[in-house]
Amino acid sequence: MAQAIQNIIIVGGGTAGWLTAGILAAEHNADNGKLSPSPKLNITLIESPDVPTIGVGEGTWPSMRTTLKNIGISETEFLLSCDASFKQGSRFINWTHAQKANGNSAEHYLHPFSLPIGTNELDLCPHWLAHREQVSFADAVGQQNQLSQLSLAPKQITTGEYQFQNNYGYHLNAGKFSQLLQQHCTEKLGVTHIQDHVTAIHKNDSGDISHLSTKQSGELSADFFVDCTGVKSLILGEQLNVPFICQKSVLFNDSALAVQVPYPSADTEIASCTHSTAQSNGWIWDIGLPTRRGVGHVYSSSHTDQAQAEQQLVEYLKPTVNIDVDNLEIRKLSIAPGHRQVCWKNNCMAVGMASGFIEPLEASALALVEWSANTLAQQLPANRQVMDIVSARVNKRFNQHWQQIIEFLKLHYVLSKRSDSDYWHDHRESCSIPESLQQQLKLWRTQAPSKHDIQHTDALFPAASFQFVLYGMGFQTLLPSQLKPSLQNRAQQLFTENIKRTQGLQQLLPTNRELLAKIAQYGLPKI
Ligand SMILES: Cc1cc2nc3c(=O)[nH]c(=O)nc-3n(C[C@H](O)[C@H](O)[C@H](O)COP(=O)(O)OP(=O)(O)OC[C@H]3O[C@@H](n4cnc5c(N)ncnc54)[C@H](O)[C@@H]3O)c2cc1C
């Protein structure tokens, strides 16, 4: 009999490491967040006290609600201990055109988390096309564009934990999130935590990882290893030599400047979505937590330098903070845009930055961590003999996800009409646009994106995401030659229902700050 997979070592204690530990333990060892009497997996997480976590990554997708619920963390506890707030999507500002110097108000559109109204019944997009001069796509099919401009929350104090009126993810303090996950995994889910530095990684004759050497804890062996060592990719990259596929020729951003700023006053509204404001050589993210904002400039070092990027960040901050912005503590981060050729080789899977990272434009990194950890937890092979069958199909899906992420991010740049720098021109050069995206854009001139354009069932971005970005940026698609009258009638009903819902929710929903204050006082109802 082949030996069962019973002992797993996760190397790395950033968000990726702790989320993987929690998801694996909840799937195999826990029931409703409580440790079962006889755990099936021994899970050990080792993290180096000498290597800090990356410490950014403050925007999540709605999938994080399911993850936290499955791990057994109360939403009230999570919101309060991680300085978290509600995120209902990303608002893209000045992406189509640069803001004119004469003070014209900024152009913006929302990529919301809620799917268009009636999605399971009817694709409203072809029906909206005839009304595109009167109403934006986001306003025609959903409520979040208007509600988020009023900084309204996606739910009420009477709405149960993880339930919602409008779909949402979170803005959170990344350091506090890792701490909460660590505490929960070790105290409730039976994960063993070792704080030590891995000094060497050893393979056996078959090429599998056999054990790790550490500074103080001796040698540690396991049946399976998860590489969550961040950009170092110590096991998958360095030890197993899986090549890195650089994507800088498609997505140029390779640098970021990050800063934290206070609100001007304690009652300043907390934004309901991430603001992404295009700049001449990159873009600035702006994330509102209850206690502060996290702001950063992502840019291409081939097109601008740090001093100019810093200057633009300071100019961006000046109108909205009442502190001395010239003396802020700004952190510089380098990004190597790309991913490993595979995420799983032999008896090791890489999760998080160790498997790849491309700029945080749609905050997809943690969503991919969740996908990776869930995939491992749900498809964990019983023994080494069948492992390569599972890893082959996981690697295929991993590459499909990266292809979609790359093309979806690139779409934001390709559709821009900005001409204020080489950066934007270069983004539209056909040599930098993946062939399949070029094909899709050609097709979308004649028909709106639909579910038929999405190649696999668990794709990260549904057709609606492409619709929100394309039409948010003014893309022109031919009007459909004919639509069934019965469907047109139903579409009209849905458009009308959406207007009513938007008006109703405007009356009903508290602001983010009001809701978070009530949660601190009463907590959300448990479900
Ligand atoms: C500018 C920027 C903005 C971002 N914004 C977002 C966002 O909004 N949303 C989002 O989803 N993601 C975002 N990300 C990505 C996100 O930050 C990461 O995906 C996430 O933090 C997970 O990181 P990690 O755990 O893989 O790596 P890290 O946080 O780097 O953790 C690596 C771990 O490995 C350990 N380690 C390293 N070497 C050793 C060793 N020899 N022995 C033992 N342990 C070792 C370290 O101690 C550490 O614990 C952003 C990234 C950047 C750069």
Image (spheres, helix red, strand yellow):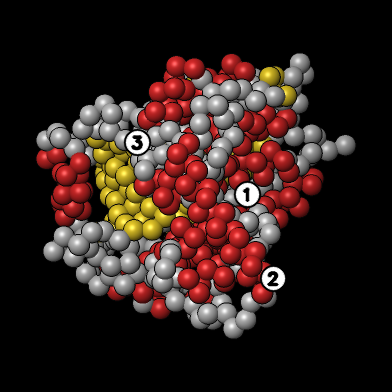
Visible residue check, residue 497 = yes
**The N terminus, quarter of image:** top right
Write down the residue under mark 2: 486
Visible residue check, residue 181 = no
Residue 424 pos. (x, y %): 30, 69
Name the element at disc 1.
Answer: strand
In primary-sequence order, the first of circles 1 and 2 is 1
Q: Residue furthest bottom?
A: 481
Q: Residue at x 28, y 29 (%)?
A: 267
Q: Which kind of residue does numbered mark 1 sit on? A: Trp
Q: Given this view, does label 1 or label 3 mark the residue nearer the observer?
A: 3
Q: CA distance from mark 1 to mark 3?
A: 40 Å
Q: Residue at x 16, y 49 (%)?
A: 315
Q: Which kind of residue does numbered mark 3 sit on? A: Ile
**The C terminus, quarter of image:** top right
Q: Quadrant of residue 513?
A: top left
Write down the residue under mark 1: 344
Q: CA distance from mark 1 to mark 2?
A: 49 Å
Q: Given this view, does label 1 or label 2 mark the residue nearer the observer?
A: 2
**Residue in front for this viewpoint, 236 or 428:** 428
Q: Residue at x 63, y 49 (%)?
A: 344
Left/right placement of residue 305 relative to residue 335 reads left
In primary-sequence order, the first of circles 3 and 2 is 3
